[in-house]
């Protein structure tokens, strides 16, 4: 009789241990799924790790035994001590910038801790976020992307008719890119084809102002004095501004592998875009695209402001930013671009400003935008990245990047060609670096000031939760 009771008791213990292990594996799965959702939405690694630490606390996983490995295409988590080891990993199949998901994951984690969500409730929220529809329809995104490129064109010095020509070409080019992506074409091939198509459309619009027969048939308001400027802006919807900034942010944050991967993917996208542009330029026979077409703007600051607001909201739409913060992003874009232009331009190029150059101007503009974002993120309840990045994206030197590549491709052995190409490449690289540093540095310093307070708040909430539920994972009991 005693032997039978001992066997039953042993079976109950094994059953209880199996349930504990099963729950532990489920918690590790939820932790990995949270990381994958953020990485797939193009969050920077520092933000992903902050959210994972909150997720660890919510799930009752001991931080000292958790080991997390982040890669661009895979996330691995291990929970181990001297005698136990449990691992979970998951592959990330696709990446698409989604600021709404980045915002909601952070909010969901704080709410889950504060309101004592069950694992079922948290898992259901993760699934709902992954399957959520975009805030904007495909045509809304394409139109917003087109007007964002038109805003770039104004910053390069075009007039308003050219703004609409650049927007028209970009809208159809972006829509083609989305269509090819829906057909599951190779992403780089889709970029090259859409860049070729948009550039070709931009070239066709030049005849409305340069061809005497056509120019005489169109109304005066459709005539542009800068007909070739749309060629510099109509493909900038392809420039991967978020990966570019995240690349520098990850490198500064010591997430080198992910940073290098993002840099290589960005480079491949720019090369594909440049190939499509170069092919279109060769077919169209345009020889002043690199050498003669001026990029120095001579518009008023009112025009700069309007163009910056349009570009910031346009790119925010591409990034699926929440609709409620669009006015904020417009104001932020105006601040960033106008400050950049004021510091950059000056008497040497016939403008009003401090004449400090585009590198210093871009750094100051992005710093100001980042400082404002660090304060306003608490007012609008969105992450710093969601506010700061759309504001500085209009400052990304897309033209410089593919002008450099175009210069390398078009070299004919003439003395000085290599110098010109390298000059564009170095200047573009420095501008990108200083924009990213301008976004990252203020956020890092401000976060260091507020991090202890937020950590104490998190620890207090977690302590109360686990005292009520007693659900902290103890590996020694497994």
Image (tube, rainbow, N blue to C red):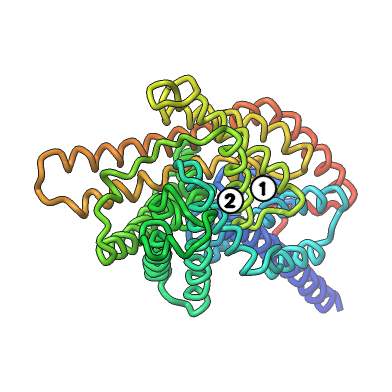
Q: Work out how far the residue at label 1 is from the one at label 2, CA to CA, in angstroms.
A: 11 Å
Q: Which-is-in-front pick, marks 1 and 2?
A: 2
Residue 122 percent coordinates (x, y): 78, 61
Please identify the quarter of the rendering in which residue 429 is found. Answer: top left
Asked whether the viewer can see residue 77, the reply is no
Disc 1: which residue: 51
- For this rendering, which residue is in front, 194 or 45? 194
Disc 2: which residue: 43
Indicate the quadrant containing the N terminus: top left, top right, bottom left or bottom right. Answer: bottom right
Q: Earlier in the sequence, mark 1 or mark 2?
A: 2
Would residue 349 appear left or right of 283 to someone viewing this image?
right
> What residue is drawn where x is 75% and y is 65%?
123
Check the image and report above or below for 49 versus 187. above
- For this rendering, which residue is in front, 374 or 223? 223
> What residue is drawn where x is 75% and y is 51%?
60
- For this rendering, which residue is in front, 281 or 388? 281
Would residue 421 appear left or right of 266 to someone viewing this image?
left
Asked which secondary structure carries label 2, the reply is loop
Please identify the quarter of the rendering in which residue 430 is found. Answer: top left
């Amino acid at each position: 009789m005693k032997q039978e009771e001992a066997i039953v008791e042993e079976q109950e213990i094994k059953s209880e241990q199996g349930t504990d292990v099963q729950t532990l594996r489920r918690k590790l799965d939820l932790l990995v799924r949270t990381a994958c959702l953020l990485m797939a939405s193009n969050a920077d690694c520092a933000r992903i790790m902050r959210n994972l630490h909150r997720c660890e606390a919510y799930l009752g996983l001991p931080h000292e035994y958790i080991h997390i490995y982040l890669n661009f295409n895979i996330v691995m988590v291990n929970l181990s001590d001297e005698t136990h080891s449990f691992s979970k990993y998951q592959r990330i199949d696709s990446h698409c910038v989604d600021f709404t998901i980045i915002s909601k994951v952070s909010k969901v984690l704080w709410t889950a801790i504060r309101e004592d969500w069950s694992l079922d409730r948290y898992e259901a929220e993760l699934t709902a976020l992954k399957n959520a529809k975009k805030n904007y329809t495909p045509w809304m995104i394409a139109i917003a992307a087109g007007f964002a490129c038109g805003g770039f064109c104004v910053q390069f010095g075009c007039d308003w008719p050219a703004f609409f020509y650049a927007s028209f070409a970009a809208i159809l080019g972006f829509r083609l890119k989305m269509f090819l992506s829906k057909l599951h074409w190779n992403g780089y091939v889709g970029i090259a084809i859409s860049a070729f198509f948009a550039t070709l459309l931009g070239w066709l619009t030049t005849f409305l102002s340069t061809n005497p027969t056509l120019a005489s048939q169109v109304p005066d308001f459709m005539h542009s004095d800068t007909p070739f400027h749309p060629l510099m802006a109509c493909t900038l919807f392809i420039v991967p501004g978020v990966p570019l900034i995240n690349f520098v942010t990850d490198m500064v944050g010591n997430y080198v592998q992910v940073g290098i991967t993002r840099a290589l993917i960005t480079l491949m996208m720019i090369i594909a875009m440049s190939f499509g542009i170069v092919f279109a330029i060769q077919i169209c026979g345009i020889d002043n695209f690199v050498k003669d077409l001026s990029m120095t703007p001579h518009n008023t600051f009112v025009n700069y402001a309007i163009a910056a607001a349009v570009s910031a909201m346009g790119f925010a739409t591409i990034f699926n930013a929440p609709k409620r913060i669009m006015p904020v992003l417009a104001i932020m874009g105006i601040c960033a671009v106008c400050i950049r232009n004021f510091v950059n331009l000056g008497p040497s190029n016939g403008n009003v400003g401090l004449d400090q150059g585009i590198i210093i101007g871009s750094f100051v503009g992005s710093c100001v935008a980042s400082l404002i974002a660090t304060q306003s993120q608490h007012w609008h309840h969105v992450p710093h990245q969601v506010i700061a990045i759309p504001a500085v994206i209009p400052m990304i030197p897309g033209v410089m990047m593919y002008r450099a590549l175009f210069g390398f491709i078009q070299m004919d052995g003439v003395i000085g060609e290599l110098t010109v190409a390298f000059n564009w490449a170095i200047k573009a690289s420095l501008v990108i670096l200083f924009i990213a540093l301008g976004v990252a540095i203020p956020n890092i310093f401000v976060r260091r000031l507020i991090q202890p307070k937020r950590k104490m708040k998190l620890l207090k909430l977690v302590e109360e939760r686990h005292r009520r539920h007693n659900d902290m994972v103890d590996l020694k009991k497994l």
